Image: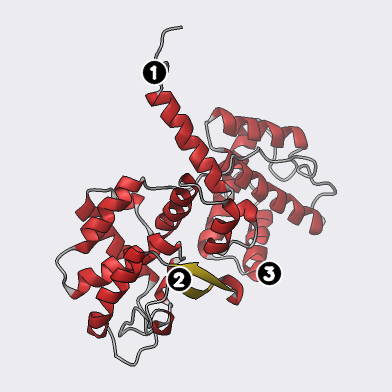
Amino acid sequence: MARGQASSHVPALALEGFLEMLIAERGAATNTVAAYGRDLRDFSDFCARRRSQTETADAATVRAYLADLVTRELSARTSARRLSTLKQFFGFLVTEGRREDDPTALITGPRQGRRLPKFLTEAEVDDLLAAAAGTGKPEDLRLSCLMELLYASGLRVSELVSLPLAAVRRDPRIILVTGKGGKDRMVPLTEAARAAVASYLPVREHFGPPQAPFLFPSRGGTGHLTRRRVGQLLDGLAVRAGIAPTRVSPHVLRHAFATHLLAHGADLRSVQQMLGHADISTTEIYTHVLAARLQGLVNTAHPLAEAPD
């Protein structure tokens, strides 16, 4: 909510002061400030229906509000965000001396189930790879190389677009990738990925100056293909493959890389190392994806799945 749009139920000075603090002390973006304003306006409207004041709300009112969010079937993630907004707002009021206690201090947010990453089936990835093979034109050779490297290596898109030409110049079986925090890791390449790179290199100069240090050069300001452009290329590829573009992205291919490796018996620690995860708990999310897929398979394909009670 922009400044000057305070709800009639929220004391204008309190709300204005809180939003000013977000901007001045935390450097909050306009959209962030607007989101906080909407959250507080919703809580204020709830308080008004209970004939209570937002600024003097007690813990019972906050708990009743959270229960109301459940009744309205809002997600646990949304409820947690709303509570976070209230905690920050009431913390601000205490700091400013507008009230002595924080009614949210002992209230914990709803438990949020861990969001499972989107994934593509192996058949869908095969369809994307086949569509990328295209006609042999430079654009298709580059797209095929991008696809094969994303799926064969699990690279982040930022790592892929900034990959130096030197990393693949001698047809390596393993490439050195610099990931988050400047940490290097070794990532093996499949034969298909190596073949795609070999086919693309002769036409690489079509996309940027020959002396460019990147595998995927560009004449733009970065000197290499941008993340946004890769996303656009994958959108077009998805259409060619008959898959909804909303289901295909560089990160979804990274998820497919990890999920399919585990499905074929790769150990979790190896997948962690190839993905460049600092903590193996981050990698463990893919075991949940596999569990969900197996459960779905049992529910639909088991001979007793539809047996009568």
SS type, badge 3: helix
Depth check, mark 2 against mark 3: the one in front is 2
Instruction: Give the residue at x 56% y 64%.
Output: 276
Residue 208 in percent (x, y) is at 28, 85
Instruction: Give the structural element (helix, strand or loop) at label 1.
Output: loop
Position in image of residue 21 (x %, y %): 67, 64
In three-dimensional space, the C-alpha distance between marks 2 and 1, rounded to whole angstroms, equals: 45 Å
Camera-side residue: 79 or 276?
276
In depth, the one of 184 and 207 nearer the eye is 184
Asked if residue 70 shows in the view, the reply is yes
Residue located beneath label 2 in the image:
158
Tag 1 residue: 303
Say how many tags the image has: 3
Report whether 286 appears left or right of 111.
left
Quarter-of-image position of residue 210: bottom left
**Residues under labels 1 and 3: Cα distance?**
61 Å
Which quadrant of the figure has residue 78? top right
Q: Amino acid at mark 3?
A: Glu
Amino acid type assigned to the residue bearing label 1 in the image: Pro
Q: Is residue 188 above or below residue 14?
A: below
Q: Which residue in the protein does label 3 denote? A: 25
Of labels 2 and 1, earlier in sequence is 2
Q: Residue at x 22, y 48 (%)?
A: 242
